[in-house]
Image: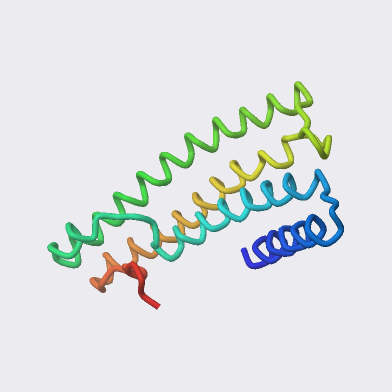
Amino acid sequence: MLAFYTFICFIIVQEVARRFLLNYSSAWAEEVARYAFIYLGWIGAAYAVRERAHVRFDIVLSRVNPSTKGVLYIFGELATITFACIALYWSTHTIQQLLHFEGTTPVLRVNKAWFEAAVPIGFALVIWRSLQALRRDVRNLIDGTEPYVGKTMFEE
């Protein structure tokens, strides 16, 4: 995530400097930064699954005992895996279409499949992280330990 973020910042700062100092701008910078941001978002989504940092209903979880909380987390992970598998299937279908019809980006003239691949890669990473969280939650439930709750909003 840091590499993509640094790359995006570098491209944008470089493009602003070129535009105002040299009175020249490149067509490729905006497109490259956009696609890097898409990859950053999907990698960030998988990271958020690992850290259990996605939006959730904490009010319900705060009112149940630890074993029920563990079961609810397991149910949530199973729902996430199910959704991610469906989305992975359909996103790979999109990639196949782009490869078949050779759709290219407007400026770079590179096959869009390279950039649209961020979606199935992201969902594959979400599935991987959800499976890891599911294993952790099942182990915690069996051991009778508190489930991992992740960070709360605005927690450092």
Please state, as top left, top right, bottom left or bottom right, where the C terminus lies in the image.
Answer: bottom left
Q: In the orientation shown, which residue stands out farthest toward the bottom?
A: 156
Q: Is residue 48 left or right of residue 12?
A: left
| Image spot of residue 28 (x, y percent) | 80, 45
| Image spot of residue 77 (x, y percent) | 36, 51
Q: How is the image coloured?
A: rainbow
Q: Residue at x 74, y 58 (%)?
A: 16
Which residue is more in the foreground, 45 or 108? 108
Quadrant of residue 14 in the image? bottom right
Q: Is residue 111 left or right of residue 77?
A: right
Quadrant of residue 102 in the image? top right
Q: Is residue 147 left or right of residue 42?
A: left
Please state, as top left, top right, bottom left or bottom right, where the N terminus lies in the image.
Answer: bottom right
Which residue is more in the foreground, 109 or 121? 109
Q: Residue at x 56, y 53 (%)?
A: 41
Q: Is residue 28 left or right of residue 140?
A: right
Number of marks in the image? 0
| Image spot of residue 94 (x, y percent) | 63, 29
Quadrant of residue 152 in the image? bottom left
Q: Residue at x 82, y 50 (%)?
A: 25
| Image spot of residue 49 (x, y percent) | 44, 58
Whether residue 23 is situated above or below residue 116 in the rendered picture: below
Q: Residue at x 43, y 45 (%)?
A: 81
